[in-house]
Amino acid sequence: MLVRRAILALAGLALALSPVSAQQTMRVGSTPTGIPFTFLDTASNQIQGVMVDIVTAIGKDAGFEVKIEPMQFSTLISSLTSSRIDLIAAAMYITDARKQVVDFSEPIYTYGDGLFVPKTDTKAYKDLADLKGMVVGVQLGTAFVEPLQKSGLFAEVKLYDTIPDIMRDVNAGRIKAGFADGPIVAYNLQQGRFPEVHLVKGYKPMVVGSVGIGTRKTDPDLLKRVNVALAKLKADGTIKKILVKWGLEE
């Protein structure tokens, strides 16, 4: 009996140490409407994009698989802190306010907000003051909401769940202007979406920030693994290749 128990124990230990069982699966929160960072590819019905490629490459180097969980941008942090997901991979700025709640990897890509208006509006907007009195739109949960609301310049700051929703209302003339992640707006327009909208080239972004992978504050070891892998991927050119693949530059 003792011998049998010893054999079973050794077998269990071998299974536990096997590469298959050691491979973890991390649930990764991503948004379906943040092209080219994250978006739903209708052909495959899978979330794809820059951040999906990057977190997948990080997982491969760090020894874990990823399972992408689609969700609204505004629910990403609460989903992470409540352990519905294990990582955030989306177009989410690393901000001081967010760092009070979750941890972030080293920065991956830096950009600012873009201002978009109807194509018929050719005014050379430079900053928020040039849009005084307008009804404008912004995505709920983004770093752009607070400065717009606190400016006191606008007749109304309408909150939207997704960037395409804002662009759709600008396209239809329901609001005068929208603010969102510059690369996401540009990519949508390059793809021929929202033909009655244009990105204001001379506008100076009100917020410039960097995106990173989000982790729980209770998972410092996971954050370390992510950063070690990310450093390798930056050094060997993998991150640059992913950015170029999706039409972005470092």
Image: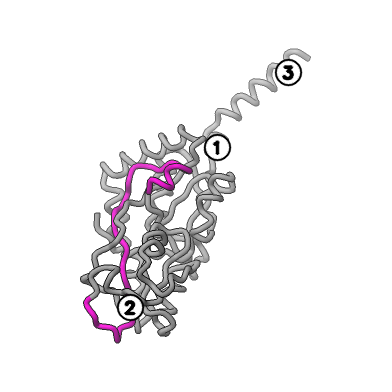
Q: Amino acid at mark 2?
A: Val
Residue 157 locus on image (x, y percent): 43, 70
Labels in figure, total? 3
Q: Residue at point 26% right, 41% down?
A: 235
Q: Amino acid at mark 3?
A: Arg
Q: Earlier in the sequence, mark 3 or mark 1?
A: 3
For residue 6, side relative to residue 72 (left or right): right
Q: CA distance from mark 3 to mark 1?
A: 24 Å
Q: Quick check: 180 above or below 219?
A: below
Residue 36 locus on image (x, y percent): 37, 63
Q: Earlier in the sequence, mark 3 or mark 2?
A: 3
Q: Which is more toward the observer, 203 or 238? A: 203
Q: Does the magenta segment cover residue 146?
A: no
Q: Which is more toward the observer, 99 or 126? A: 126
Q: Secondary structure at mark 1?
A: helix
Q: Which residue is mark 2?
A: 117
Q: CA distance from mark 1 to mark 2?
A: 52 Å
Residue 153 locus on image (x, y percent): 35, 70
Residue 39 locus on image (x, y percent): 45, 64
Query: Residue pushed farthest front?
Result: 152
Q: Quick check: 197 above or below 212?
A: below
Q: Amino acid at mark 1?
A: Val
Q: Which residue is mark 1?
A: 20
In the rendering, which numbered label is found on residue 5?
A: 3
